[in-house]
Image (tube, grey):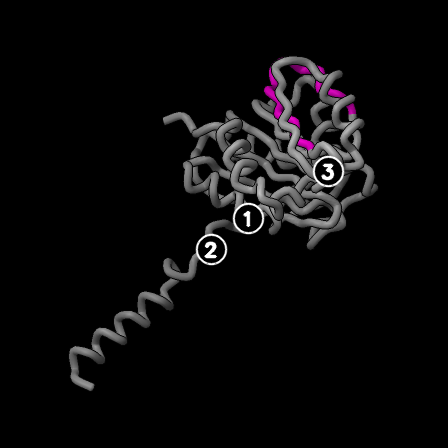
Amino acid sequence: MNFNRIVFLLASLAVLSSPEASAQPYQPVSFKTVDGGVIEASFFKASKSKAVIFAHGAIFNKESWYFLAEEFQRKGVAALTIDFRGYGNSTGGSTSKKMYDILAAISYLKEQGFTDINVVGASMGGAAVLVALSNNSVPIRKAVLMAPAGGPAIESTATDKLFIVSKNEGMFDGVMAIYNASAEPKQIKIYPGNAHAQHLFKTDVRDDLIARIINFIGPAKP
C-alpha cells in the first residue's frame, strides 16, 4: 500500500470518527411539570421561531416520532418529541395528568423563544393534547389529532385543527364526536381501513399521511 493511500485512509477514518460525523440530529433535554414531574425529550433544532411537539400513543415512545421530527427539521421546523410520565426516564405524579406534560413542553419551547408552537398527538397523546387545549389561553397555532383516545372538543378558534382517523377503527365514532363539537377552523381526513393512530404509518397511506401533516403544519417563516 503506497503512502498516499495510507494518508487517504487515515483522513477518512478521522472524518468518520469526528463529533460532527457521528452527531445525532437531536439533543436530549428535560423540563419540569407543574405537579413535580420531570419530562425527558429530544429536541431537533432548526427554526428559531417555529416548532412542533410530538405526543406519542400508549404503546409508543418519543423515539417513535424521530422519523417525522427529522422530516420537519430538514424543512427548517424545530421539533420536540416527548416521553410521557412513566415512559423512558420521565417521571411525574398521577398518570392521568399527562396534559401537564404537554403544557410543560409548551412552556419549554416558549422559554426557548418560540412563538409559533404546534402539536401532533396520537391516541393517548391526542387525548392529552385535547385536555391541555381545553384552556383557551394555551398558545398552540396548529394541532394534529390522530385518533385521540377521548378528551374534550377544542373550543378555541385560535388553533387550526386537523383530525385524522381510520374509517373502520374502534374509536371512529368518538373521534367524529370530538371533531363535530370542535370550533372552526378545522378539517378531518378519514383513511380507509382500521389502523389506529400511529399504526397508520405502517400502512400504504404512510407517504400521504406524512405529507399531509407536514403541509398542514407548514414551513417556518423566513
Q: Which mark is residue 24?
A: 2
Q: Is residue 203 left or right of residue 16?
A: right
SS class, disc 3: loop
Pointers 2 and 3 in contact (C-beta within 8 Å)? no
Name the spot of residue 109 as percent of width and height, x first: 56, 34
Residue 142 vs residue 42, the one in the foreground:
142
| Residue 111 seen | no
Of residues 191 and 142, the one drawn nearer to the viewer in this rendering: 191
Q: Which residue is mark 3?
A: 123
Secondary structure beneath label 2: loop
Q: Name the residue: 78% across, 21% down.
A: 177
Rate crowding at label 2 as few (under 14), some (14 to 19) or many (20 or more) other CA atoms within 10 Å.
Answer: few
Q: Is residue 44 left or right of residue 40?
A: left
Q: Residue at x 20, y 86 (%)?
A: 1
Residue 31: x percent and y percent?
A: 63, 42
* Tag 1: amino acid: Tyr
Q: Is residue 30 above or below residue 222?
A: below
Query: In the image, which disc is placed on residue 66?
Result: 1
**Where in the figure is residue 221, as x and y percent of width and height?**
40, 25
**Disc 2 to disc 1: CB gap under 8 Å:** no
Q: Are marks 1 and 3 in contact (CB under 8 Å)?
A: no
Amino acid residing under circle 3:
Ser
Of callouts 1 and 3, the N-terminal one: 1
Residue range corresponding to the magenta coloring: 152-165
Identify the residue at image location x=53%, y=36%. 208
Label 1, label 3: how far apart the Cα atoms are:
17 Å
Q: Please tell me whether residue 113 belongs to the stretch shown in magenta.
A: no
Quarter assignment of residue 203: top right
Q: Nearer the viewer, mark 2 or mark 1?
A: 1
Q: Residue at x 47, y 55 (%)?
A: 24
2 or 3: tag closer to the N-terminus = 2
